[in-house]
């Protein structure tokens, strides 16, 4: 029998930027790490450049890789999501034995993870879909990790993953999320929230720049100041850095040199698609995804710019009003952000109920405080809210959030009005305010929609004064009948 001591505790397949950084992170934490990549050049480069950071066992074939792992074998896949992941899972499964663990750390679609977990279970293997956030820097120095899959596999895998995850107040940013696709589902929604968070920051910048006429450097200072308060977060911090950057070639602010067409890899879109299926209004995430799509519609935009009338009914904010406007924008940003997070957590609750995952939202608020892109101080508030009431209907109903809204809502309205008067787009600020007003409204126009549906399709409606379903004989004598 092979001497287990000299074998690796974990192996990483796929040594592009994410995989090689995670492998280095494991090695730096004293684990022996088996490494394999389809093209051997990447394996060679990792060993040549970083082989002295710990103990690596480089493999030339998947069979050699698998046989260099301690039992139960733990192999982390970090390859492109989709077909490449399926191909690698197939190769590993053929070489592995019952009880071994395959971990997919890529950005896989959670329904793929559900399918793969069932397939691997049927072969006696454990399959763990693990969301990993933090980009390449996080992968190297401490990401947030959201592993799903069988709880049993977490016993042997958890301590390894926790050892390389970020830590906040001594708590690792990694915990078992729930069965099969739960980990990838919450990672997907995390990314959706990230889209909304980035968009609201973008809208705040846009208003300071074009409604208040401030320069990027000045705005960088504003974001730096905001980062010391409620808005303290990684995304606000890096926003200041980006806005401060000067283009070496032209001497202009870098932000003015970057083409204003935002890319996307698909996790935001998946979040919205899943929300549509679950019937959960994630308006902030939806608007953020559409805003990226619209920014990328460059031919359409250049055809309409200067052609469609602006109809603006106000000029820029005056110097006297600027200080108050900046504070209003801060509040509008915070309020919109609260809505985005509340909606994201609604989607996670609905997904968890739909799939029977039993995801604890407090775990997410805890592990997202470090390592990941949406890390923010205010996640502590979300954890407190779920501690106080694990079944709360909406995060906005928690006393902290409700109290904040009292302070924020007037400013939020002023900002949306101001932007509209100046013809500046604020899709997430505005739609989040509409969501907020819809949520708290005593009556919605949905009553009229029910009337229309009953008129053309006899879909029936409920009455406010007694139970049952009713239909009006619209094309007859217009009397009402109980359905
Ligand atoms: P990429 O997503 O760019 O994938 C490149 C890796 O996939 C290479 O190792 C490549 O091997 C391998 N690969 C491909 Br492509 N097809 C393969 C196949 N058929 N068989 C075996 N290997 C194959 O790498 P990444 O940017 O490091 O991301 C890895 C995963 O982590 C992805 O799922 C990504 O979505 C996720 N993720 C990325 C980030 C980020 O910030 N980049 C953050 C969080 C999660 P080769 O060298 O032989 O071509």
Image (tube, helix red, strand yellow):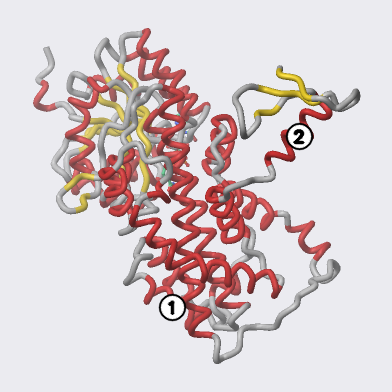
Residue 155 vs 310, above or below: the answer is: above
Q: Which residue matches tag 2? A: 451
Q: Residue at x 48, y 56 (%)?
A: 197
Residue 453 vs 189, above or below: the answer is: above
Which quadrant is home to the N terminus?
top left
Q: Real-space Cα distance between discs 1 and 2?
A: 49 Å
Labelled disc at residue 266: none
Residue 390, image x and y in percent?
31, 38
Q: Which residue matches tag 1? A: 222
Which residue extends farthest bottom?
320
Q: Which secondary structure lies at badge 1?
A: helix
Q: Quadrant of residue 244?
A: bottom left
Ranked by sequence position, the earlier of labels 1 and 2 is: 1
Whether residue 48 appears in this view of the structure is no
Which residue extends farthest right?
476
Residue 148 vs 395, above or below: the answer is: above
Residue 188, image x and y in percent?
46, 39
Q: Nearer the viewer, residue 125 or 222?
A: 222
């Amino acid at each position: 029998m092979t001497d287990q001591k000299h074998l690796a505790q974990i192996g990483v397949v796929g040594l592009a930027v994410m995989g090689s950084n995670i492998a280095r992170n494991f090695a730096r934490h004293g684990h022996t790490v088996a490494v394999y990549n389809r093209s051997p050049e990447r394996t060679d480069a990792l060993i040549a450049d970083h082989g002295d950071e710990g103990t690596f066992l480089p493999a030339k074939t998947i069979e050699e890789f698998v046989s260099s792992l301690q039992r139960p074998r733990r192999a982390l896949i970090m390859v492109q999501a989709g077909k490449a992941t399926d191909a690698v899972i197939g190769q590993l499964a053929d070489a592995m034995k019952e009880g071994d663990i395959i971990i997919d750390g890529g950005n896989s679609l959670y329904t793929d993870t559900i399918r793969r977990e069932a397939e691997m279970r049927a072969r006696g293997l454990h399959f763990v879909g693990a969301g990993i956030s933090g980009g390449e820097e996080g992968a190297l120095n401490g990401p947030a990790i959201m592993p799903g899959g069988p709880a049993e596999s977490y016993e042997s895998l958890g301590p390894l993953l926790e050892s390389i995850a970020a830590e906040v107040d001594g708590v690792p940013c990694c915990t078992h999320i729930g069965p099969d696709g739960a980990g990838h589902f919450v990672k997907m929604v995390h990314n959706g929230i990230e889209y909304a968070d980035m968009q609201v920051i973008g809208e705040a910048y846009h208003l300071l720049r074009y409604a208040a006429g401030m320069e990027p450097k000045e705005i960088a200072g504003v974001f730096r100041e905001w980062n010391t308060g409620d808005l303290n977060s990684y995304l606000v911090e890096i926003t200041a850095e980006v806005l401060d950057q000067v283009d070496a070639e032209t001497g202009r602010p870098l932000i003015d040199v970057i083409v204003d067409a935002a890319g996307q890899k698909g996790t935001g879109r998946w979040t919205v698609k899943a929300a549509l299926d679950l019937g959960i209004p994630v308006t902030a995430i939806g608007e953020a995804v559409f805003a990226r799509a619209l920014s990328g519609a460059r031919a359409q935009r250049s055809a309409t710019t200067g052609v469609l009338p602006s109809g603006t009914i106000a000029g820029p904010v005056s110097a006297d009003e600027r200080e108050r406007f900046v504070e209003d924008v801060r509040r509008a940003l915070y309020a919109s952000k609260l809505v985005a997070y509340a909606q994201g957590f609604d989607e996670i609750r609905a997904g968890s109920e739909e799939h029977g995952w039993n995801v604890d939202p407090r775990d997410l608020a805890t592990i997202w405080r470090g390592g990941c892109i949406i890390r923010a101080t205010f996640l502590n508030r979300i954890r407190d809210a779920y501690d106080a009431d694990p079944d709360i209907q909406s995060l906005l109903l928690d006393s902290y959030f409700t109290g904040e809204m009292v302070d924020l809502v007037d400013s939020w309205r002023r900002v949306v009005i101001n932007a509209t008067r100046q013809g500046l787009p604020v899709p997430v600020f505005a739609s989040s305010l509409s969501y907020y007003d819809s949520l708290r409204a005593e009556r919605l126009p949905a009553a009229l929609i029910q009337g229309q549906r009953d008129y053309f399709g006899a879909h029936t409606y409920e009455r406010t004064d007694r139970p049952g379903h009713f239909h009006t004989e619209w094309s007859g004598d217009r009397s009402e009948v109980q359905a």
